[in-house]
Image: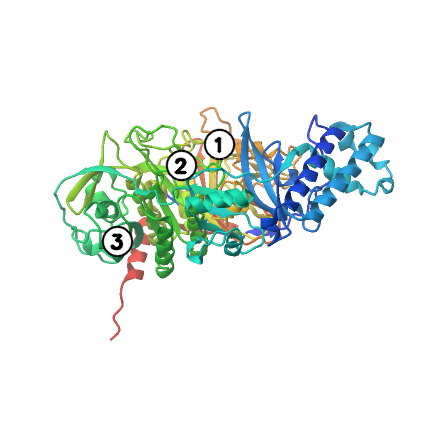
Amino acid sequence: MNQVLSLKGHFEHRKNRGRPGAPNLPKNATVTVVKLESLIRELTALKEYWKKQSELRQFTTKWLISAYYIKIAAKSNRIAGFLSTGKQPNQKIVGAKFDKRQGKNRHVITYLVDERDVDASIRHAQGAIEVLQKEFGGQVTTDVFNKGEQIKKINFKNYQLAKSMFQKVIVDAWYVEKFDVPVAKSTKNEQLVTLYDVGVNSEELLRGLGIAVTSTEFLNERTVKLTPAEYALLYQKAPYLIAMSVTDLSEFHPQDFGIGSNEQPTIPSPQNEPTIGVIDTLFKNDVYFKEWVTVENDPGLIQFASDDDFKHGTEVTSIIVDGPSLNPELDDGCGRFQVKHFGVAVNGKNSTFLLIQAIQRAVKTNPEIKVWNLSLGSDLEIDENFISPEAALLDQIQIENNVTFVISATNRRQGEDEEKRIGAPADSINALVVGSVNQKNQAASYARKGGVLSFFIKPDLSYYGGDKDQRLKAVNGKGIAEVEGTSFAAPWIARKLAYLIQVMGLSREVAKALLVDAAYGWQDKPADPDRIGNGVVPRKISDILETSSDEIRFVLQGTSESWDTYNYGLPIPLTGNHYTFFARATLCYFPDCERNQGVDYTNTELDLYFGRVKDSGTIDSIDKNKQVDDHPDYINEEDARDHFRKWDTVKHIAQPLKKSARPKKVYGSKLWGISIKSKDRLGNGERKPLTFGLVVTLKEMNGENRIEDFIQQFSIRGWMVDRIDIQQRVEIYNQAEQEIEWE
């Protein structure tokens, strides 16, 4: 077996020197005067509509206008001529969702504009119509427009319209189907509502509409708890202000099934084991492992609690503390863990407000805890067009506090539709969301359908949570219980994640990448992403931190500080004048997120290129990635998302293992490279440094062990190479955690 290697080297950074050329139409497009006239009519009608909205005009002169696109629109395909007075239109976006028509997702993007924007848009469109009529016979095609020869001959001074604005308006007119007012759902059950950001204090805005709320009703600046009557009044007076809404605020339940016995095992006293935070139902303090648990039960809940209110939380914590003793077949080699248990919920319905407040308080007052287990979830399905407020706040907490939540993917109840989507907060993008499988590595019978915002893979990965064929064992106040549910899959992943971070000393980015990479293996796409995610994590931690003798696995950590973060100096060992390796790589990062951006939730995209350095100085990436803007085969947004997981926070690329595969040729530099391209969604120039973790595995085609050659070659080129020796790092951890008594 080979140990995983940790590499440390220097990454270079460079800005994107490329400049966008003139706007172009896609292949076979035609823009007509009729289309421009239609957009002008819509903008004119919107202008009249907003002038009549007296409720909003008493607070602001801003208007909300939604652009309905004909496709999922990349940033470069979004409007640049319309609504472009002052700031660029991309900087005026306050929301985005998908409108599914004819089986295809299309962007609906909402902009915050003013009357000047609309007047200028109408004026520019009228100018473009005049140019089309006099210079192009009423319409222009891709061939004529993109060649630009006819456009160059036009004297635009005659039209009081700049050439660049004409080009922008024409391209906008192709990609935008229509302009309209934002549309909200009409329902009697909405309670948790997020308002569009119109530059006005939300509490004052609601009071002006006759809805008296206090600051205690707000989850954040624009998300407020309303009664059904208050929601109805808001919908009647200003439905356009409703960006998102969630039904039945208090539908959070423990995620488990189970039966029990009275047996209680034994356990030694804790020493210096790492601590995992657990946020769950109340903890029963008379179990055999109570010495391993620091308990903070909510006193307000204990006062009226029944035995059932202690059951779920105690069972979850029992697996984190002593899961391998209770379930020897799942012994992961991670040992035991101490737990700080926050009992903040009861069996049944629980308040999102109270839950989120408790989580914020727990994380802030316990900065030493880096991994938190959350096995509570909503029975209600997540929305397809926005992240739940609970998940968004968890994402924010993880960014601000450098912690990771491990969250159960929620269960489908007996008799419920098999297509039922997962519930909040399992739509947290930055968290490790865990689904459950049976002993055959098939989705458990209670698995719900994942996928978040029609794109992100959730659950992230899966583990054994018990099923009707073989339940797990956990302990509650009454003894050992046979249990099943995603609640009991998540703690096993929390154990592995905490071991990698706290005992092995790895960053959360590298630790997450190792888990996802191990679940993926050598497949290039997950087999059942909606229910199992990226795959099933191996049982033994050694199977993650060690490889077979014909494999070399190394990890890297870096920070993306500019458009391109790169190192072209990886001396992968040669065999003669060829490379005899298959390769795979997994990248993970934790980006800032904006719930108000709807389906465009993550602010930053990291795009991975890994492979041989060609004579041209570019990387021949193992997945043939062609997303770079100046690449001659630049691809559209849908294909980039589908083939290269654009905007996903996990990137996995792999070459398939083939017996007939031939060694790869060597280019002149005889080196491999890593390039990580960063894209800023909002385009406001506020790019922040973003830490990433990368795991690379090389498999020798002929079964040879080349790890010594690898270490030698990398050391010669100045790389620091460190073997991740499990036993050695455990000893270092134990020594570091010893208490020193000063005489």
Residue at mark 1 to residue at mark 3: CA–CA distance: 53 Å
**For residue 689, side relative to residue 722 (left or right):** right
Which residue is nearer to you in this view: 464 or 333?
A: 464
Q: Is residue 415 above or below residue 165?
A: above
Residue at mark 2 to residue at mark 3: CA–CA distance: 27 Å
Residue 425 picture quarter? top left
**For residue 662, side relative to residue 310 (left or right):** right
**Residue 160, image x and y in percent?**
83, 43
Residue 200 picture quarter? bottom right
Which residue matches tag 3? 301
**For residue 428, side relative to residue 609 (left or right):** left
SS for dot 3: helix
Q: Is residue 1 above or below residue 33?
A: below
Whichever of labels 2 and 3 marks the residue nearer the N terminus, that label is 3
Front: mark 1 or 3 = 3
Whichever of labels 1 and 3 marks the residue nearer the N terminus, that label is 3
Q: Is residue 635 visible?
A: yes
Q: Residues within 10 Å of mark 3 (few under 14, many from 20)?
A: some
Q: Which mark is residue 655?
A: 1
Q: Residue visible at 31% across and 50% down?
A: 279
- The amino acid type, in three-letter code, at marker 1 is Gln
**Residue 581, image x and y in percent?**
47, 34
**Residue 145, image x and y in percent?**
77, 32
Residue at mark 2 to residue at mark 1: CA–CA distance: 36 Å
Which residue matches tag 2? 381
Please report contact status of discs 2 and 3: CB closer than 8 Å, yes or no.
no
Q: Residues within 10 Å of mark 2 (few under 14, many from 20)?
A: some
